[in-house]
Image (cartoon, grey):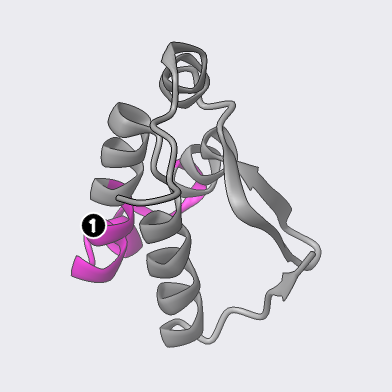
Amino acid sequence: MIGIKKRGASWCHLAQTGRAPLPRALTIPDIMDLVTLADVRTLLGRLPKETRAKSTWQHVEAGLKQAATDGETPELWAALQMVLMLENVEYRLK
């Protein structure tokens, strides 16, 4: 692709360790701030088992695994916002 640089090994390391940033942070008031992949992982871990079993949250989890592999976070970020909207969870972009 023209004008897009391939991310280096250090970026992949950030993704694999969960420190890769989301394209834009978001806040779920009185719950948590989501800034990195690790924050999304923490959110998923806090969800009740029945909620995590929903296909929408399964899609977010799959996106998290993919982002941890390739370091690409925009798709995960979009899926996360969509699920939060569908679940009527109040959130704010930072």
Q: Position of residue 94 (x, y in %)?
A: 79, 64
Q: Residue at x 73, y 70 (%)?
A: 93
Q: Relative to residue 17, is residue 83 depicted above or below?
A: below
Q: Residue at x 58, y 79 (%)?
A: 89
The amino acid at mark 1 is Gln
Q: Position of residue 90 (x, y in %)?
A: 66, 80
Residue 93 placement, left or right of 56: right
> Is 18 contained in the magenta span?
no
Specify the principal SS of the magenta part.
helix
Give the residue pinned by disc 1: 58
Q: Relative to residue 29, is residue 87 depicted above or below?
A: below
Q: Position of residue 79 (x, y in %)?
A: 38, 67
Q: Residue at x 39, y 43 (%)?
A: 72
* Category of crowding for the residue at label 1, using alpha-carbon neighbours closer than 10 angstroms: few (below 14), some (14–19), many (at least 20): some
Q: Residue at x 53, y 87 (%)?
A: 88
Closer-to-camera residue (67/4): 4
Residue situated furthest front in the rendering? 2
Residue 62 placement, left or right of 30: left
Question: Quarter of the image holding residue 36?
Answer: top right
Closer-to-camera residue (94/71): 71
Magenta highlight range = 45-61
> Is 55 contained in the magenta span?
yes
Residue 77 placement, left or right of 64: right
Q: Secondary structure at mark 1?
A: helix
Q: How many marks?
A: 1
Q: Position of residue 76 (x, y in %)?
A: 39, 56
